[in-house]
Amino acid sequence: MAILECENLGFSYEGKRVLEGVNFSLNAGDYLCVVGENGSGKSTLIKGLLGLKAPDEGSIRLSDGLKATEIGYLPQQTQVQRDFPASVYEVVLSGCLNSLGSSLFYSKELKRRALENMERMGIDDIKNRSYQTLSGGQQQRVLLARALCATKKLLLLDEPVTGLDPIASGEMYNLIKLINLCDNISVIMVSHDIHEAVRYATHILHLGHKQLFFGSAAEYRESSLARRFLGGARI
Amino acid sequence: MSQIISMFSYQFMQRALIVGVLVSLCAALLGVSLVLKRYSMIGDGLSHVGFGALAIASAFNLAPLAVAVPVVVAAAILMLRLNHNNAVKGDAAIAMISSSSLAIGVICVSLTTGMNTDVSSYMFGSVLSLSSGDAVLSVILSLAVLGLFILFYPRLFAVTFDESFSRATGTRTELYNSLLAVLTAVTVVLGMRMMGALLISSLIIFPALSAMCLCRSFKSVVIASAIISVLCFLFGLVFSYFFETPTGASIVAADLICYGLFRLFAGRK
């Protein structure tokens, strides 16, 4: 069943078209990787999916009770965050913000949810450590646990392995795949790393100001586009 | 000890103590968010706007706080807008607004009362300048600032740590940024009478920076910052009474020494 459908989606900045003709759908349990060069419209698409930027044509339909504010978003890290004095627990708990509703403070249940997600990500032993003292890989796990607090259905990850060493990247990819398979949470991941994308994802969306490809990862591997994008190498 | 007790038998010292402790608390709590969000310059800019507003109020014989609070709140919201607007760079815009307000204030003062002790007390602060009406209003406003900060603490943390995540999960980040700016504006105006326009921003920045040297979680930084701020204020106030130094400057000096010690200590760990 589709949880997200985009129909003929187009976005502009100050009248200048940056992305158009995006048509794809995402079923529960899918792992979609969005690839494309810098400035190809990937970030714009993310903003659109999160409801932070209105499309100027087409539509985004969320179904199965999913709301735009209930997508578990993992943004790219900013410099401010890297040396921010906050404990791991405080950061993860802030993922429950969209469940606060009109209450002012986090309930016992939300605190338990934060603890559960920390256990899932294997960071419960560093609960009281300061975020700024963690390694890049640990920081991404913390942000992933926070994203899981915000969603039950869909994770949206923006370049989750940027700046990580190869071992930490591999762990991060495995962790995301594990969440996808075991908890049946759908994943949309924006990535530069095309090789890893086709290895882990079930579907690929290739953007270049417009939709260049959408289909299964297996189909993408056979396409001429993939071969060109990979510099002639077959994967 | 008996000297300290006799010091607070003066009514103006009692007022200074109550208002000062409350304003130090407000400034310290807000300061943590402002420093982390790289908004420290807004606090500094607002104090200059406050000077302009106070100068105009006194020129027209109006109640100083009643004029300054709305003007500075409006300036705070304007600065926040400019910070997100790329037409003029945020820090340049703040510098522009603050020096213009200072200029308008100085012109206004020289045309009416002339440069006198009043002006000097706006610039560098004075414990004598608080009237009882001011004191009551200051207590009410600072309690409101403290209350709002505590009530919205989870949301303010989220917006401070990660604006894009907060916005994506449906938090109205602009609302909370404006809340921060408005609370800061009120705190700056309240603290300005005692600390002076040129010194008030240190009340916002120093305690937060000192606390960050030692503490590693947001909550502990906030609490430590509040404690440091109140202690430095008390120390500065008592010191200024006994050694007849300017109050605002003494408090800043206490904050500076505290920061220096904490920095040294943190560096050794």
Image: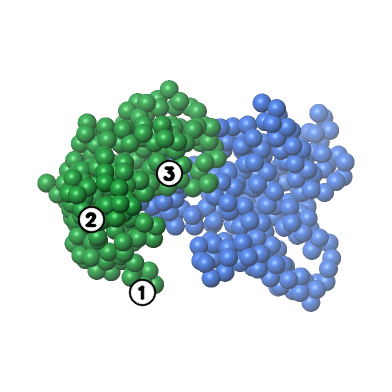
Query: Separation of disc 1 and disc 2 at Cα?
Result: 32 Å
Disc 3 secondary structure class: loop
Quadrant of residue A46 within the rendered picture? bottom left
Give coordinates of residue B123: x percent, y percent. Answer: 77, 59
Residue at 83% x, 42% y: name it.
Answer: B241
Disc 1 secondary structure class: loop
Q: Amino acid at mark 3?
A: Thr
Q: Which residue is mark 2?
A: A224
On screen, residue A93 above or below A122: below
Give me the chain that's blue. Answer: B
Callout in the foreground (1, 2): 2
Q: Residues within 10 Å of mark 1 (few under 14, many from 20)?
A: few
Q: Residues within 10 Å of mark 2 (few under 14, many from 20)?
A: few
Callout 1: chain? A
Callout in the foreground (3, 2): 2
Give coordinates of residue B128: x percent, y percent. Answer: 78, 52
Q: How many marks?
A: 3
Give coordinates of residue B126: x percent, y percent. Answer: 78, 53
Q: Are marks 1 and 3 on the same chain?
A: yes
Q: Which residue is mark 1?
A: A15
Q: Amino acid at mark 1?
A: Gly
Q: Amino acid at mark 2?
A: Ser
Q: Earlier in the sequence, mark 1 or mark 2?
A: 1
Give me the chain that's green. Answer: A
Mark 3–mark 2 contact, CB under 8 Å? no
Residue at 59% x, 32% y: name it.
Answer: B215
**Residue B8 appears in the figure:** no
Q: Which residue is mark 3?
A: A162
Callout in the foreground (1, 3): 3
Q: Are marks 3 and 2 on the same chain?
A: yes
Q: Earlier in the sequence, mark 3 or mark 2?
A: 3
